[in-house]
Image (tube, helix red, strand yellow):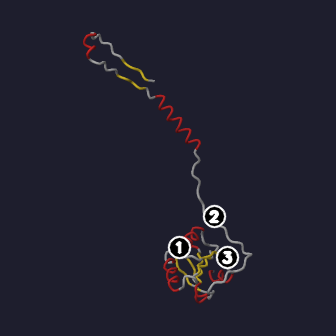
Amino acid sequence: MAEMNNPNNGSSKSKSAFRRKVLSTRVDLTPMVDLGFLLITFFIITTTMSQANALKFIMPDESGDPMNIKETGALTLMPADNGKVYFYEGQLDPSKFQVTNLKDMRQLIMDKKQRTKDKDFFVVIKPADSSSYGDLVKVLDEMKINEVKRYAIARIEEGELALLR
């Protein structure tokens, strides 16, 4: 482990009696390095690697009573393929059916929110079959960013599917 080197170069006793001898020490660090590698190996083996976190998406049970919302405060968003978002306000009317993209959706939500009372504002999100999971997450992010308190995810209906085609 550690050893002391005492060089004996033939010095006389009388000179060294007044001076203190300086002994050099040499520390062998090999066991410390071995211990370090053993600890690193132990922690690498026993540590679990980080697992991917996925957003679990659970749809509500459809057996309950339908929720009544005011037609003037309803905004329906339907994310589709290629970043398109189809939307309409109130009840489904083919003349009011419009399209925007994910980037302009924020302004659309803010405009509708300003024109509507807080208690009446409600967003219905109906993802199309052609939309990606990422597009749905972007729409949900916009709900959080714009502080939309009341929104729901519903299944797309046949009349809306016909308009999407």
Instruction: Decide which of tag 3 and tag 2 comes sooner along the chain.
Output: 2
Query: How far across and down, in percent of the image, does residue 139 sit?
Result: 56, 73
Q: How many angstroms separate mark 2 from mark 1 (CA)?
A: 18 Å
Instruction: Decide which of tag 1 and tag 3 comes sooner along the chain.
Output: 1
Figure check: 135 above or below 77: above
Res 65 → quadrant: bottom right
Figure check: 30 above or below 4: below
**Circle 2: element type:** loop
- On the image, numbered disc 3 is attached to which residue? 155
| Number of residues whose C-alpha sits closer than 10 Å to that of mark 1, classed few (under 14), some (14–19) or many (20 or more) | some
Q: What residue sits 52% from the left and 83% below the top?
A: 112
Compared across the picture, whether 116 is left or right of 13 comes to: right
**Circle 3: element type:** loop
Res 134 → quadrant: bottom right
Q: How many angstroms separate mark 1 from mark 3 (CA)?
A: 19 Å
Compared across the picture, whether 64 is left or right of 16 comes to: right
Query: How far across and down, in percent of the image, does residue 66 sit?
Result: 70, 80
- On the image, numbered disc 1 is attached to which residue? 142
**Circle 1: element type:** helix
Figure check: 133 above or below 101: above
Tell me the amino acid under the disc marked 2.
Lys
- Rendered-image quadrant of the C terminus: bottom right
Tell me the amino acid under the disc marked 1.
Glu
Tell me the amino acid under the disc marked 3.
Arg
58 or 132, nearer to the observer: 58
Which of discs 3 and 2 lies nearer the camera? The answer is 2
Q: What residue sits 63% from the left and 87% below the top?
A: 91
Per the rendering, the mark at residue 70 is: none
- On the image, numbered disc 2 is attached to which residue? 56
Instruction: Decide which of tag 2 and tag 1 comes sooner along the chain.
Output: 2
Q: How many angstroms separate mark 3 from mark 2 (CA)?
A: 17 Å
